[in-house]
Image: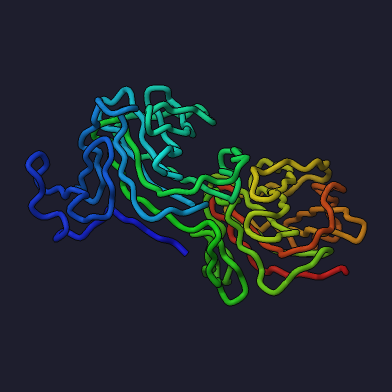
Amino acid sequence: MALAVLFAMAASAVEGGTADAPGAKSLTDKAIYEQIGGKWLIEDHRMRCASVDREKPGARALAITGENIGPTHQATSVTFPPNCASGQAGLVFGFTAVSYHMYVYDIGDQAEKLCRVDRATGQAVVLWQAKKTLVANIAYDMKLEAKRRSLPGLGYTFEEGYPTGKVGLVSSAQDAAFGYLKVWDAGAWVNTAGRWMNFSDDTTMVNFEGKGRLRLGGTFEHAPILAQNLRTDAFRVEFEVRRDTEAPASFCFAFNAKDQDEYDFVRIHHDAGKTAPGGFRFVDGRAADAVAGRAGGKLPACGPKDALWVRVELNAESVLTVRAAATKEGLNAAAPCYASERFKRSGGFLGFAGGGGHIYIGSFSVTTLN
């Protein structure tokens, strides 16, 4: 499922070092990466941008690896050097002879940015950006999630499809360091517990409080886990939800799923604030669209490890309802906390996806209504 390119190398791989950095290993020694516009070293289980050629267009150092590939999930961690006040560092994808895309943290602008870069001129066109607080000498995780037409975590759609090319790292800040690089196929899945098609690297089956449960991880609402051999266009599902941290968490229940890039979902919260659910839809791998619905009865207030029982039903009249209660028996008396007539009975797989924080799903049952 995942191609992992890790910089946590064995000690024997970094012995000797180079003239400017004893104990470091040049990337060219491993013949894994193509270095462009600067020099990169491996040291202390990290990859460091040792220099940036300021005479090159754009003044950015790149470390490019792999073959030409399409939609991929990528993850890394980046640390700007002490006292760094300007520069960008992050991930590269869609690298070709003509151009590439980069998702970077910009410490000078205090922002995260998605850019398309023309290789001939070095000019970067900002496609998307958002404010982000960044401090030198602190490691920040980065995760880039892809579908066949979008980066849904950024809400950005590529109208002509996801850019194909090689992947890698980029930095305009000398001495910026990366802790790891993970790249995995956005369309690949693994069999989890013999009954789930798992598209996420952070969702798994675990034992939690004496019961086997699905653990939905992180913010990967864009990489679902779908029940195998079950397709339906009208259903009633029930399941128990818990979280294991003080911080609030959320997750997504997916339905009408054609594949990992096209499905409807309801985001449900496990928190003390009784946050109402919301409805959304992925169509042909584009960024998610909100689906109109109405809030009704409130969810129970949930602390860490408190049980939240959920019932989601899509009936023969194409009315979707969500009910929630502190006990399974309480679902029968609970008023819908979300309802919508905007979801069609198009049919497909059922499943889940992460939404924020670790969520544990147990006692999952399905009743088909068609």
State whether residue 123 is above or below residue 235: above
What residue appears at the point 21 percent right and 39 percent down from the top-left corner?
Answer: 39
Q: At which x and y percent is residue 117?
A: 43, 33
Question: Where does the image place residue 157, in percent across and percent down from the top left?
Answer: 61, 40
In this rendered view, identify the residue nearer to me: 255 or 304. 255
- Residue shown at 85% from the left, 61% from the top: 332
> Is residue 120 rendered to the left or right of residue 256?
left
Report how many numbered discs are placed on residues in the image: 0
Considering depth in this image, is 295 or 211 the residue closer to the camera? Answer: 295
Q: Residue furthest toward the bottom? A: 194
Measured along the vertical axis of the image, is residue 122 above or below residue 28? above
Compared across the picture, whether 308 is left or right of 197 comes to: right
- Residue in the image at 33% along x and 23% along y: 86
Is residue 305 shown to the viewer in this render? no
Q: Note whether 37 is above or below 24 in the view shown.
A: above
Q: Is residue 300 visible?
A: yes
Q: Is residue 61 left or right of residue 154?
A: left
Q: Position of residue 315 (x, y in %)?
A: 88, 60
Say which quarter of the image contains residue 58: top left
